[in-house]
Image: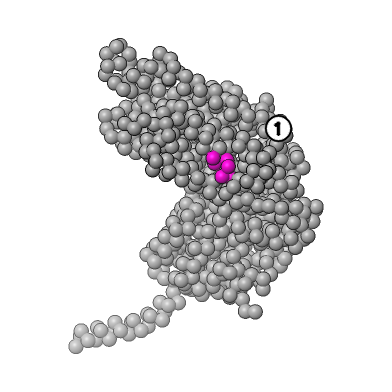
Amino acid sequence: MIFGIPPQALFGQLLIGLINGSFYAMLSLGLSVIFGLLNIINFTHGAQYMMGAFVAYFLLQYAGIGYWWALLLAPVAVGVVGVVLERFLLKRLYSLDHLYGLLLTFGLGLIIQGIFRNSFGSSGLPYAIPAELTGGRNLGFMVLPNYRAWVIVFSLAVCLATWFVIERTKLGSYLRAATENPALVQAFGINVPRMITLTYGFGVALAALAGVLAAPIYQVNPLMGADLIIVVFAVVVIGGMGSIMGSIVTGFGLGLVEGLTKVFYPEASNTVIFVIMALVLLVKPAGLFGRAQ
Amino acid sequence: MRKYRLLVIAALIGLIAAPAAQAQISDGIIKIGVLTDMSSLYADLSGQGSVIAARMAVEDFGAAKKGMKVEIVSADHQNKADVGSGIARQWLDADKVDVIVDTPNSGVALAVTQIVKEKGKAFLVSGAASSDLTGKACSPNTIHWTYDTWALANGTGSAIVKTGGDSWFFITADYAFGHALERDTEAVVLKNGGKVLGKVRHPLNTADFSSFLLQAQSSKAKIIGLANAGGDTTNSIKQAAEFGIVKGGQNLAGLLVFITDVHALGLQTAQGLIFTEAFYWDLNDKTRAFAKRFAELDRGIHPTMIHAGVYSATLHYLKAVEALKGDDGTKVIAKMKETPTDDPLFGKGSIRADGRKLHPMYLFEVKKPSESKGPWDYYKTRATTPAEQAFRPIDQGDCPLVKK
């Protein structure tokens, strides 16, 4: 017995925490990439996550295209919407204070969510788990649904690949250089505005990808993003704004903490992350992995 | 002198007019305020549909033909008791609202019932579930129309315990409604010789239930009682299937399930669920006709029992106002209680002194996909509880309005 709970039950809960953590990690990663390179606090992220799930639903419902293709097509579609958004709206705000970007994206998020809610209601639409991943395997201490195992593996792979591209490749070094000194990088003949646009599109696509992953677990629901985005922002704040690895590690870590809270004091499970956020801000205002500027 | 005469005439008019004014409708307009969840997890099962139902009741009553001016306003309480109370005060104090209807979310409804009582207006509850509204918190200004936690527990709980589901684990929404539903169901389980092995309380509007489901699974209880509603219930049911809970021999009891939830889940996932409701659109010709009109106005959504309750309550309210020729809240509620109810959706019924509206409750089972003829053809009736047995006996609710 560990704290009055059989260790097997505890393992199960930790695993569940990791699954939820993988959603936090993917979403906060997208936010971090966007903030790191564009200095935009992307409050439409929740709506874009929701749009990813909806595109998957539309593909299945109206075109008969299943989950695996949706995993590719939905992020591309939502990413393109993101690119358009950046070209026509966000671009105008780079020279202004962060607050303007925040207000614009926040407003857009509300509008998108409102439109979906008006058209599709609030109770959500069904989206089944793909046939290949139904069922589960008995691990002895719990039944692990195959789909959830897939979510952990897949999102971990996506997170690490993103980290690798940004921190370890030449393209990534251009991106990082462009955030430090865009004028200088442009002088070397690199098209910085295009790079920024594509980066935003990529961050948005990550959100949509998380949305497709979430569709079979939760209902495809217009409000799914709004419920999650605030938590994800807390994750980013705890990890340190703009830190790629920080987002990934805190995403998974906070999933674990939340999972444990659901066992020991379930009533507090939707507040615990904010308590941690407050504590981290008191002790390390730049976040756990952030550098003070 | 002429001035003085004018003054006397004015005073006389005042004398004649004053008593007449008391029996009239305040400011000449009956204003109905639909206070509901417009934007969150209960928006489909109440929300805009409740406004539509109220409007249909006003039409069917024939208010315009009878020369009564009726106006409907609506607002979103965001499932927050403080927001709901603020709107209620604004409506009753400044906007001349005479009656508040619907109000899903027991936390909000319990707050509003106090305010309505203080202001001497009327409150017709369809959406909220807590049986405390006709128990400890009953009010001479409130009628609880459609259903309550006691009726749900009594209908679903006893049916399940009697068919062998005698050990329970509760997954409960952590606010007034969930607590009341859990309490009332637990009482039924214990009374019928069952036992409760454990319970876990989750915050309202939770997305991931896997942790709670795992706790329920390891309790080895035969029945996992879902004392929650709306999106919380659909997510619980969907994720329970994923973790193989039903395959493992445990059964789910959705203690409060609406047709919009079944629609959202799809029959594949929802088939076989058993639960208690006060209304189903496909009960008879009158309910079908109502559902057809309603669906055309509400994006194809078929009416839930909450929508039906808003319609029926509003209709009965307008009849009482007409009979009284006045809209004083306390008097109208008293008149409503004294008049037997009769409407196309619930048939004949009555209202008790504690504010409880009585009508039969139904135990429904969700059809298999092969049994359903199409969207919204979801329920078959397993049992009907007559009105006198469907609700808590009046002497057991501790309502101060009931003389012992």
Query: How far across and down, in percent of the image, does residue A74 sit?
Result: 52, 26
Q: Is residue A21 left or right of residue B367?
A: left
- Residue at image coords 66%, 27%: A133
Residue that carries the numbered disc 1 in the rendered image: A139
Region in magenta: A257-262
- Residue at image coords 77%, 52%: B165
User: Does residue B170 belong to the magenta stretch?
Assistant: no
Query: How far across and down, in percent of the image, does residue B364 sit?
Result: 71, 51
The residue carrying pointer 1 sits among few (fewer than 14), some (14 to 19) or many (20 or more) residues within 10 Å by Cα, namely: few
Question: How was this image coloured?
Answer: one colour
Asked whether residue A195 appears in the rendered view, the answer is: no
State the quadrant of the N terminus of chain B.
bottom left
Query: How far across and down, in percent of the image, does residue B401 sit?
Result: 58, 75
- Residue at image coords 20%, 84%: B3
Asked whether residue A140 appears in the rendered view, the answer is: yes
Q: Residue furthest top?
A: A189
- Residue at image coords 42%, 64%: B89
